[in-house]
Amino acid sequence: MKKLLLSVMVALTPLLAGPAAAQTPEFPTGPITIIVPVAAGDGFDSAARILAENLAAHLRTPVLVDNRPGAGGALSVAELLRGPRDGQKVLMAINASLTFRPVLQAASTNYDPFKDLQPVSLAERTPSVLVIANGLPFSDLKGLVEFATINPGKVRLGTAGQGSIGDLDVEILNGLTKAGILSVPFKGSGPAITAMRGGHVEGVIVSLGSVSGTLKAGAAKAIALSDKFPGYEPVPTLKELGYPQDLIGVWTAFVVPAGVTESTRKTLEAAFARSLQDPAVNTRILPLGILNDYQPPARVVTMMREETAVVKEIGKKLGLAK
């Protein structure tokens, strides 16, 4: 009788285990979506699509791109935090949403980047660049500052949106020069560049990755970079021009919502690490004015803390933060 009972229990074991196993399917369970905080056609959008191709092979599932530009990256964060926290959605977070908005637009920022988000990896970086249209009465930063000082309100610089890195960089310029340059926010770098080319603004401060095609075509001129970049060595930084503060550049990190399981996060970390360090991927992304700069999750947190402190200091000097 005992042998018969044991045999029955052994036979039933797979049936009993089946439903429990079905409740925790192996990740990923379907297509992965990368939420991108810039408009289609932006350099970071193109980089995300190149990376998505490579990631799909590692994760063995389609990887889609969902553009959510606007509000200095806040709209993309809101999309990430909406819905299940299962790792099927990953955000390419721009540093404006991680270190700028929580300091400079704290009242309208309804998330805590340190509590609500978990980093997967540092992703890419590109300088911020001050670009001016062709045919203006000035051709360098000195001339821009002199013209803006004599003609208040006549120099307008488009940015990727209120609270964006370019928006703060305009404030930095005004704080250093007292030139009264106007910041004109758009819904993404692409519309700002289009407005400059159409004569609606005199220039833009955006990521180099978003405007590199325009510069290579000779349709505009770069007159200042936040830091040096291969292929753009003649373009000076503010410190090279004698100012005590440089513009702030752009970097991105891949993040998931807090609450994603450790096993899912580790799977994503491994896949993104392989793709971001693949020389073939970087070769395709570099011409966009963007460098792949893979770093592990812990480094992302350190960078967030360091840049948040810098933004607070600059914000206090300019009267933009308490």
Image: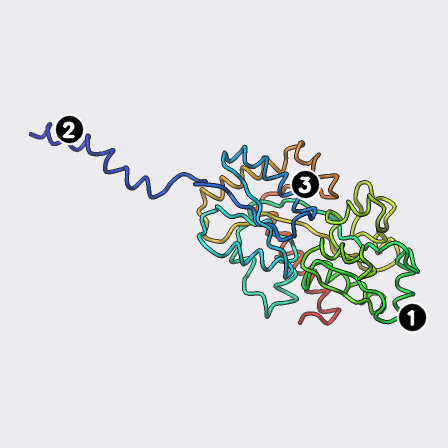
Picture colour scheme: rainbow
Q: Nearer the viewer, residue 266 or 75?
A: 75
> Of callouts 1 and 2, which one flags the residue occurring earlier in the amino acid sequence?
2
Mark 1, other Cα within 10 Å: few <14 / some 14–19 / many ≥20: few
For label 1, the SS is helix
Split into 4 quadrants, where in the image is the N terminus?
A: top left
Q: Are marks 3 and 1 in contact (CB under 8 Å)?
A: no
**Mark 3 lies on residue:** 292
> Of callouts 3 and 1, which one flags the residue occurring earlier in the amino acid sequence?
1
Left or right placement of residue 278 versus residue 138 in this view: left
Separation of residues labelled 1 and 2 (CA atoms): 94 Å
Q: Is residue 320 above or below residue 139?
A: below
**Mark 2 lies on residue:** 7
Separation of residues labelled 3 and 2 (CA atoms): 58 Å
For label 2, the SS is helix
The amino acid type, in three-letter code, at marker 3 is: Asn
The amino acid type, in three-letter code, at marker 2 is: Ser
For label 3, the SS is strand
Locate residue 132, reporting x and y percent: 84, 56
Q: Is residue 111 above or below residue 85?
A: below
The amino acid type, in three-letter code, at marker 1 is: Ile
Locate residue 48, reporting x and y percent: 63, 43
